[in-house]
Amino acid sequence: KNQVEQSPQSLIILEGKNCTLQCNYTVSPFSNLRWYKQDTGRGPVSLTIMTFSENTKSNGRYTATLDADTKQSSLHITASQLSDSASYICVVSATVNTGFQKLVFGTGTRLLVSP
Amino acid sequence: AAGVIQSPRHLIKEKRETATLKCYPIPRHDTVYWYQQGPGQDPQFLISFYEKMQSDKGSIPDRFSAQQFSDYHSELNMSSLELGDSALYFCASSTDPSSYEQYFGPGTRLTVT
């Protein structure tokens, strides 16, 4: 069964500190892995997208890693800001036999950055 | 830059009523996806359309139907609403079904009372 699991479920850190969120998946056939940031009640916003051959990608203070062998990914947030408070969702995409992308959403990590 | 537009943003309906949600994709995006996100849950894929044809189907109840029109906007029709249908409904669009990037709209919050 295609699954994406994230940890921790929730996290509180002080402003300015770094943190790392984890994602494990069993999606097949793997196409790509994305990290989204979702503010409460808003649509997810893409942070990074990585294919099988990429093992790291950065977007500002966000750095994602991918280990396709162990089927693990992490999202590292550097020098956190209050505006980073949101849910971070790991989404793994499988290419179905029609050529379409099917997204499998993780359970999300709710991050709270405290002043 | 233009984004995905969804309307209405908020909708309150009573049980057994019907609701229609609309999604206007980013210009030149011909693929539309619908997701349902219950309180505290991750988004669940409902259905997708490519070039006005259904391209994939997820956990969409039989009470729901959707279509994509000639201008590529899509509508999600929900009938015999139940309390459990209360959720955020997101629409996303992409340039084509094989595209890695899906752009999400702001969502429609449906409350069934």
Image: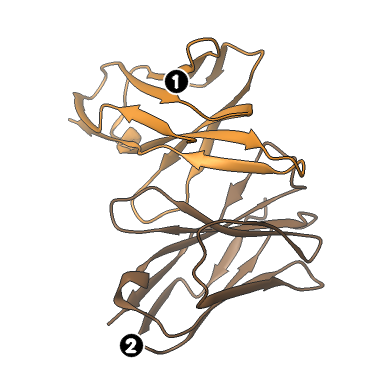
Chain colours: A orange, B brown
Is A18 placed above or below B111 here?
above
Is A10 placed above or below B70 here?
above
What's the chain of the residue with tag 2?
Answer: B
Label 1: which residue? A61
Residue B1 in view in this figure: yes
- Badge 1: how crowded within 10 Å, few (<14), some, or many (20+)? few
Residue B76 in view in this figure: no
Is B93 placed above or below A103 here?
below
Asked which secondary structure carries label 2, the reply is: loop
- Badge 2: how crowded within 10 Å, few (<14), some, or many (20+)? some
Residue B8 spot, x, y in % from top left: 50, 75
Residue at 34%, 33% in the rendered image? A84
Label 2: which residue? B14
Residue B98 spot, x, y in % from top left: 75, 40
Is A43 placed above or below B85 here?
above
Quarter of the image where one finds residue B67: bottom right
Residue at 78%, 57% in the rendered image? B30
